[in-house]
Amino acid sequence: MLLLMLAGMVIISYRVNLLPELFLAIPRISGTTLPVQTLAEASRSGTKLTYESRQLATVTAINTSHDVILVGTNHYFPFVMGHYIPHGRFFREDAVRYAHHVAVLNQHAAFILFGTHEATGNTLIIDETPYVVFGIIDDKDNNHSNIYIPITRLSNTVETIITNLSITTDMIRLNEWQRLGIGDNQYYFVNFSIRNTVIRNRPILALIALVSAILVSILIRTKPHIWKLLLILPLVILWMNAFTRILVAYSSRNMLTDIQSTGLTIQMANLIRYDNLSNIFFLVFIIIHPILIFSLDKMHLMICSKRQ
């Protein structure tokens, strides 16, 4: 059972490692927005920001209407989010600045609308206006038809802001955002890289706990009391660490749920699911862990008794 829990945590850690490390600013009060123009100026100064503004819509392609999700964003979106463009390209900064009629389809939308994943160069109709398909994006969303268009075709303001942690440190990022009016009194700051790191480290902690349990079971009856305490102490620290992390994750679940409910990105939903599964595996592992120590200790005692 312990090995199954450990294997589950290893698999989850591998999947989490494939997700981008993101830093989000989420409004504390619904309706708090920032002008797109302000964020565009910040992007040109070196702070690579992106965002999403989603709305349901009906589009026409090859004389057939389809229900889709329009996603207004900027040209940094695929780079910050780590999305691959298998066909064509994403729209550029000029398309956002001048509100060009261009679109990028996710693979699900391309197949639904045009029957192929290579729909670059085709035309679709949104609100009686033709849009040229510039490219196809792999956004990891296989359940929804997402069509990405310049944010200026949908709105002049945005709420939640996303950036990539690999560009600058958190402190520099916060200082830059303060100048834009993005302060901690108006926004929650969510650092997903911290949560990614916690999930990735759980298998290592579990493995250390497993090895420590085996050492305790072997040496607990043969070594002086001081050695017993030194061996048991790391286990106590690991258990406290485990429950502390679980409590932290539990306390922040409402914020994560809010992020997921906004439909921000498929990565957020994946991270929440991975975090929940990893917590369950880790909790079961820690609960069963003392049973392993007790069982190994009893087994060691039986072996010693038979030898005598």
Image: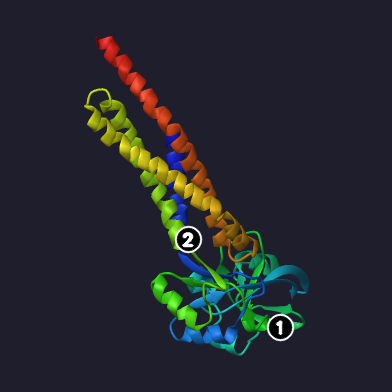
On the image, which quarter does residue 57 sit in? bottom right
Residue 151 position (above or below residue 211): below
Residue 99 position (above or below residue 279): below
* Residue to which mark 2 is pinned: 19
Residue at 74% x, 74% y: name it.
Answer: 59
Q: What scheme was used to colour the molecule? A: rainbow
Q: Which quadrant would the C terminus be assigned to in this image? A: top left
Q: CA distance from mark 1 to mark 2?
A: 34 Å
Q: Name the spot of residue 111 as percent of width and height, x first.
A: 65, 65
Q: Amino acid at mark 1?
A: Pro
Q: Secondary structure at mark 1?
A: strand
- In-image side of 143 versus 222 (left or right): right
On the image, which quarter does residue 66 sit in? bottom right
Q: Work out whether residue 126 or residue 234 is closer to the camera in this orientation and state it.
A: 234
Residue at 66% x, 71% y: name it.
Answer: 30
Dot in front, 1 or 2: 2
Residue 129 position (above or below residue 287): below
Q: Can residue 72 be seen in the rendering of this structure?
A: yes
- In-image side of 12 versus 308 (left or right): right
Q: Name the spot of residue 64 as percent of width and height, x first.
A: 77, 71
Q: Name the spot of residue 103 as percent of width and height, x first.
A: 63, 78
* Residue to which mark 1 is pinned: 130
Query: 10 Å neighbourhood of mark 1: few (<14), some, or many (≥20)?
Result: some
Query: 10 Å neighbourhood of mark 2: few (<14), some, or many (≥20)?
Result: some
Q: Can residue 103 be seen in the rendering of this structure?
A: no
Q: Earlier in the sequence, mark 1 or mark 2?
A: 2
Q: Are marks 1 and 2 in contact (CB under 8 Å)?
A: no
Q: Secondary structure at mark 2?
A: loop
